[in-house]
Amino acid sequence: GDSGIGHALSKYLDELGFTVFAGVLDEKGSGAEELRRTCSKRLSVLQLDITNPQQIKDAHSKVKEKVQNRGLWAVINNAGVLGLPTDGELIPMTEYKRCMAVNFFGAVEVTKAFLPLLRKSKGRLVNISSMAGELAFPHKDLGIVSKCMTFLGYGMSIEGYEE
């Protein structure tokens, strides 16, 4: 919710009348402040660095407290980083690990934490990736690898869900 698609989607869903929990990397940042200033009281800004398990637990507790027995209509995994635009051979392993931590493992951990709330309401899990996960671009090796891994997350299901 700090910027980009997540920010715009948070505002749009709030305008439609949904209760929105906008996870942001920096709850004191300009994106979070703008959401607080321009959106209704239905929108809650949550500190959520998806590479930080404690922040995921804290966000889950706040959401669970607010929705109580209703569950969640949707979880939208949108956080992502593209990484360094250079040949894969030149990228340090720390940068590969950082991208995987955000683009893959973070999304998986958020999903695992919130699945019980989705099951309660037969909600939806939405994983937003990028074209970097499907197409090869010169000097974008890191983003391609980590975004491609996002597609593996589609194997997670909301068990017991029937239409």
Image (tube, rainbow, N blue to C red):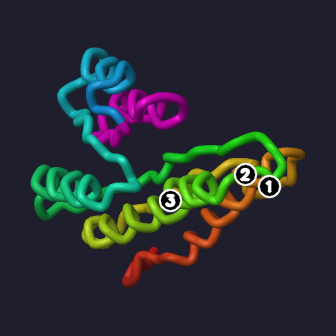
Separation of disc 1 and disc 2 at Cα?
Answer: 5 Å
The furthest residue to the bottom: 160
Side of 74 where 43 appears, left or right: left
The residue under the point 13% across, 64% down is: 69
Secondary-structure class at tag 1: helix
Q: Secondary structure at mark 3?
A: helix
Q: Disc 3 marks which residue? A: 101
Q: What's the magenta region? A: 1-25
Q: Residue at x 86, y 53 (%)?
A: 136
Q: Give me the C-alpha separation between circle 2 and circle 3.
A: 16 Å
Q: Which residue is painted at 30% across and 16% down in the image? A: 38
**Residue 96 image point, x, y percent:** 63, 57
In this view of the protein, which residue sits in the foreground, 71 or 89?
89
Q: Report the amino acid beneath label 2.
A: Ile
- Amino acid type, label 1: Gly
* Contact flag, marks 1 and 2 (Cβ < 8 Å): yes
